[in-house]
Amino acid sequence: MRSGTVSPYDLTTAHASTAPKYPVGMRGVIDPVHALKNVLMASGGFKEYADAKLFGYFDVWEVVYVKAYSGVTAGTLVKSNELKLVATGDGTTTTVVSTNLSGYAANTLKNGLVHKVNDAAAAVDEGTLGRITANTTGVLTFTPAHTAISVANDDFAIVVPYSVMTAIADDPAIGIALATLTAGQYGFVLQKGLYLTAPFTAGAYADGAALTSHTAGVFTVRNADTEPLCGYLYGDSDTDGTATTHPVYVHCDRRF
């Protein structure tokens, strides 16, 4: 884990960049009352929360620097770039053949991690972890080599560290994007702290309600313990279901 000093100005859309300004994966802890006053005002309604005593419990923002695999919108929940990969043909000791890769452009999974979850033939190499060196629309290449070749119906888990995309319903989100990022851009994700204008799906909400992810990265009520926790509605309620944004104390179960 990397840590360092973060300029509050760099949390805004103005500093979403195509080249990394900080080490990817760097984490920062920031005082939102003083250092982020202008950012909070820009995000809507700082005056409502201007009393520093309010932030006695919410006295820091925890953020992490990431790269967007696909476009994400400021304020919406994002998830880690990961997938379950099922082999659909025979590969080699360093390749997996799978039609599941068709949605990933060449080398967009490079430097990610591949974990062999299940061997369909003889339970060989299960639990091994490798680094992805390349991917095409049908083949994933990794190192170090496995003992046996991959065969159809082998199961793999793929994750690209600090690469994010928009969360959908019941996804284990890792935080909310603090800037709108296009694919390939770098920016910060808020993993813990108060965000004033988070988007919600239509519906009635009670102050303090536990929240989870919904379609297109918006928040909704968490109805069961099996649904990932993404935060809590804070200092607001909506009895008629008309409001589309609310203040949220972001607190995701999932980190990277």
Image (cartoon, rainbow, N blue to C red):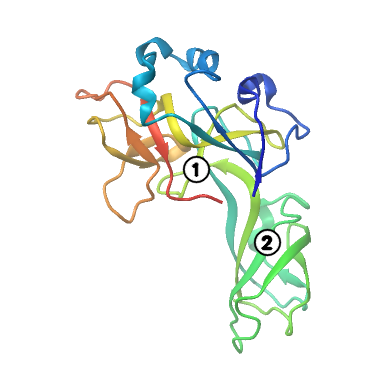
Point out which mark residue 49 bears.
Answer: none
Task: Give the residue at x 37% y 30%.
Answer: 248
Q: Residue 124 location in percent, x, y?
A: 64, 86
**Which sits in the foreground, 123 or 127?**
127
Q: At label 1, which amino acid type do we have?
A: Ala
Decide: is 253 above or below 158: above
Decide: is 201 above or below 108: above
Q: Residue 197 location in percent, x, y?
A: 42, 22
Q: Secondary structure at mark 2?
A: strand
Q: At label 2, which amino acid type do we have?
A: Leu
On the picture, is 181 further left or further right than 132? left
Q: Residue 74 location in percent, x, y?
A: 54, 27
Q: CA distance from mark 2 to mark 1?
A: 20 Å
Q: Are marks 2 and 1 in contact (CB under 8 Å)?
A: no
The residue lying furthest to the left in this view is 239
For mark 1, does the 10 Å Cα neighbourhood hold few (<14), some (14 to 19), or many (20 or more) residues?
Answer: many
Point out which mark residue 113 bears.
Answer: 2
Residue identified by numbered label 1: 167
Decide: is 51 above or below 122: above
